[in-house]
Image (cartoon, rainbow, N blue to C red):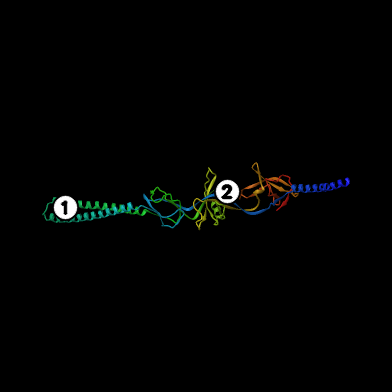
Amino acid sequence: MVIKRVSTLLLPTLALGLILPSCKGKTEQQQQAPELAVLTVSEENTTLESGMPTTLEGENDIEIRPQVQGFLTKVCVEEGQKVSKGQTLFVIDQVQLQAAVDAAQAAVDAAKSSVAVAQANVNTAKTNMDNNKMLLDKNIISKPAYQTSVDSYNAAVAQLNATKSQIGQAMANLTSAKRNLAFSVVTAPEAGVVGQIPYREGSLVSPQSLLTVLSNNSDMRATFALNEKDILALTDDGKRSLQDAIAKMPEVTLTLANGERYNHPGKIISISGVIDPSTGSATAKAIFPNPQGMLHSGNTGTVNIPQVKNNVMLIPQAATYEMQDMKFVYVVNDSNKVKSRSIQVADQSDGQNYIVVGGLKPGERIVTEGVGISVRDDMVITPKK
């Protein structure tokens, strides 16, 4: 009975001993050959995008300033409102300006009356002078008496000329007063969108006051910087001019501050021929249509410049790791064992991929999963796509 009991106890133990090594072997095998994604390197034609931070501005931003001093009596628009050319934006107190017009008009009327009186005096003096001339010829009056009438006539003419000059000045003052009155109504010189309005009704403004900025945003300009390497790439290392490069450049796109792509592509219109020595970059501008008025001056974003590359080896940046400013990948051999290898990449990238220019050949396989985390040299893996 004892022997039977012992053998009964040993059977499960022996069975368990047979099972455990088998499970352990499978576990070790699974640990030794984890499934990891791999990529077979090949040459292909691709388009990369270089993102350049930008600030947008309207095609024509106009500062609106009053041309006369006075108190604002009416603000006719709101911030962000679209306005048409000639539309009234602000009205400045017209009471004093109208009073100045009335005073100037009165001065003109008075000057005209003075001219009429002076002209009548000239006519009378001339008649007396002519009569005295006939009397002098007949020896009825003396020469000194005649000279007195001549002097009176000359004095009347001088007075008329002086009065005429006064009416000229009065007319100029009236024109100026009417112009100032017209300036009290501030209108939009162009169609656009109203910017910030710092002054409200009752504020004292003058020609130094910035009432608002009117942005003509039918098209928006995006200003960004290109470094020397970017410019050399565009000009094919200086083999063609910037003008030729700009003319042949494809359309660019705009990524908005929220990360979304703007649905209207743009075009680079200019690149400065001067590189700022302090920044090592040149200023470039692209123009984007803005038919719905979605974009505004001051918006920020990223201009994406496409670069077409032919017959290049493109690998994900996630398939690389860095050490001492060098980039490495894990190459998978025919036995599915991985080995780290340094590679060289081009300066241009789209933030997600690298163009390999050295260290890899078409047809080789590299690990694209777990690089820099779980992959180690001489590890055997089970490749998966």
Name the residue type under label 2: Asp
Q: Earlier in the sequence, mark 2 or mark 1?
A: 1
Q: Outermost residue, left direction?
A: 140
Q: Outermost residue, front direction?
A: 1
Give the Cα separation between the discs numbered 2 and 1: 92 Å
Camera-near label (2 vs 1) is 2
Comparing 5 with 224, the one in front is 5
Q: Which mark is residue 203?
A: none
Disc 2: CA contacts within 10 A as few (<14), some (14-19) or many (>=20): some
Q: Is residue 206 visible?
A: no
Q: Is residue 339 visible?
A: yes
Picture layout, residue 324 above or below residue 293:
above
Residue drawn at x 27%, y 54% is 106
Residue drawn at x 13%, y 51% is 145
Q: Which mark is residue 149?
A: 1
Image x and y of residue 24, in percent: 78, 47
Image x and y of residue 261, in percent: 56, 54
Residue drawn at x 21%, y 55% is 117
Comparing 101 with 277, the one in front is 101
Image x and y of residue 272, in percent: 52, 49
Image x and y of residue 239, in percent: 58, 50
Disc 1: CA contacts within 10 A as few (<14), some (14-19) or many (>=20): many
The residue tagged 2 is 230
